[in-house]
Image (tube, rainbow, N blue to C red):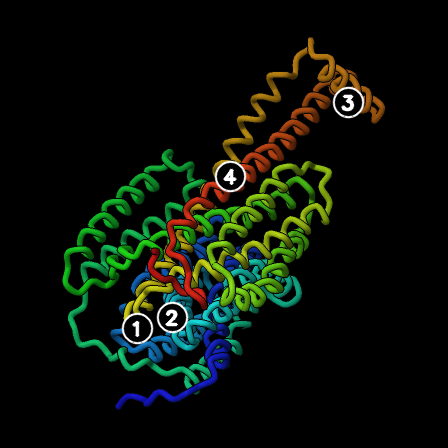
Amino acid sequence: MSETPRQVNPWLVAVAVMFGTFMEVLDTTVVNVSLPHIAGSLSATIDEATWALTSYLVANAIILPITGWLANYFGRKRLLMMSVTGFTLASFFCGFAVSLPMLIVFRVIQGAAGGALQPLSQAVLLEAFPPEKRGQAMGFWGLGIVVAPILGPVLGGWLTDTYSWRWVFYINIPVGIASIMMTRMFIFDPPYIRRGTSGVDYWGIGLLAVGIGALQIVLDKGQQDDWFGSRLIVYLLAVSALALTAFVIHEMTTGAPVVNLRVFGDRTFATGTFLMTVLGFVLYGSMVLLPIWMQTLLGYPAVAAGIALAPRGLGSFLAMPVVGILLSKLDARKFLAFGLVVAALTLVQFGRLNLDAGYWDFFWPQFVQGISLACLFVPLTTVSMGLIPKEQMGNATSIFNLLRNTGGSVGIATVTTLVSRYSQSHVNTLVAHVTPYDGVSRGMIEGLTQGMMAQGSPPAVAAKQAYAALFGIMQRQAAMLSFLDVFWLLGLIFLGLVPLVMLMRRPAKGGGSVAAH
């Protein structure tokens, strides 16, 4: 016997789904800074411990795109409660793990359970609020999506240093219990969702799991294993390409697809999904670059580097509710164009820094960038879903979130690879200018040699130490130049997206879209 939906204050619904979503997004980054402690505690290497991250991301990515189908098959409320319950229990057992294999198994369960939370919460919110209030709903939802990944490393570092790495997982338990209780009280399935009785698209699920799983491992391990220099990476990439190609063909021809790709026939949704994918690419890529720059070149401790990323979250936190309110009165495409241009300028500003950069040189560009991201996430989500029928909302939000996360994974893999490649290129260029005939180089070597001799080194030893010190200086400068190059590239990518905004249909009042005239 199904429940009878009743009228509930939509903000209670928003809080209920935000608990679970925030918890799940937080866990994509909160474990990062705890890896050395996890490795030491479980008698594993750092390299082996990274599977605690990879296993979560792979399971998460596999479940994301089939969430819409799962919601129709099991019922949205039932699936939401199953997901939060599974995530909370898996979190407890992750914290209780006595070996690395045990931790990885429960991280897989945690990732699979959490994969449904983002698209489910987004679909529930879009339906709980009337069209004119959807901008405010997405502003609230966007807080979790933008702030949680930034808060993750800070919270993870603090919990690990103050208590134990196990509390990184235990902290989810009270949040999960609160989410389960509020979901049970305030969330109800809409009339059109009935537990499915149709056949299961086993081929679609299987091909998707193989394709997405292999791709996620490639992106996570590629740079570490030298990409195409590794047979495993080449093999997994080929498997992923074949499986995903077969998946697309199968889903477009089967009568009951697990993922309805025909939703891309809506021009606004297709454009918005592409923009969100690139937004994930740039956002997550730049989020990885900054702490590495701060720790490796400027000497920031891990927790201090995490705290130094907080201004971006602060900017988004302050701006998202305002953008959500204004979205019902202004053209959302103007917000998108403004957000892209401002975000691009902040990335270019990072590309103009040097090794003398202080905290405030990072604070203000990040704070402004946080404001610009509010102008991107809220209207982009609202407009992209504007013409999607309610029956397809779960399917559309699943695809939307999958491609944002995939864009983020590609962005992280790309920027780390580019920094490594650019750094080596700059080292080669700088070394080529160090010759006995170059006055600047000769002056630096002589000065360094004299300094070493003043410390008691014999002349021959001092000369070798001077060359080693000079090479270290060049490596540091080359690394800095590589970071600047990548930030400029990310800024240019954002600027290149601005014309695509006009491909989206003119938004109606409230953030939805109307047909172009």
Query: How many residues crowd around disc 2 within 10 Å: few (fewer than 14), some, or many (20 or more)?
Result: many
Disc 3 residue type (three-letter) = Leu
Which marked residue is nearer to the observer: mark 1 or mark 2?
2
Q: Circle 2 is placed at which residue position?
A: 123
- Name the residue located 43 percent from the left edge and 63 percent from the top edge: 382
Residue 128 sits above or below residue 325 on the image = below
Of the 4 image quadrants, the one containing the C terminus is bottom left
User: Of the residues under marks 4 and 2, which one precedes in the sequence?
Assistant: 2
- Secondary structure under badge 1? helix
Separation of residues labelled 4 and 3 (CA atoms): 40 Å
The answer to whether residue 79 is left or right of residue 453 is left
User: Of the residues under marks 1 and 2, which one precedes in the sequence?
Assistant: 1
Q: Circle 4 is placed at which residue position?
A: 492
Separation of residues labelled 1 and 4 (CA atoms): 39 Å
- Secondary structure under badge 2? helix
Q: Circle 1 is placed at which residue position?
A: 71
- Secondary structure under badge 4? helix
Check contact, mark 4 vs mark 2: CB within 8 A: no
Residue 64: in sight, yes or no? no
User: Of the residues under marks 4 and 3, which one precedes in the sequence?
Assistant: 3
Query: How many residues crowd around disc 3 within 10 Å: few (fewer than 14), some, or many (20 or more)?
Result: many
Check contact, mark 2 vs mark 3: CB within 8 A: no
Check contact, mark 1 vs mark 2: CB within 8 A: yes
Q: Circle 3 is placed at which residue position?
A: 448
Disc 2 residue type (three-letter) = Ala
Q: Position of residue 63 (x, y in %)?
A: 33, 63
Of the pair 262 and 285, the residue shown nearer to us? 262
Residue 478: in sight, yes or no? yes
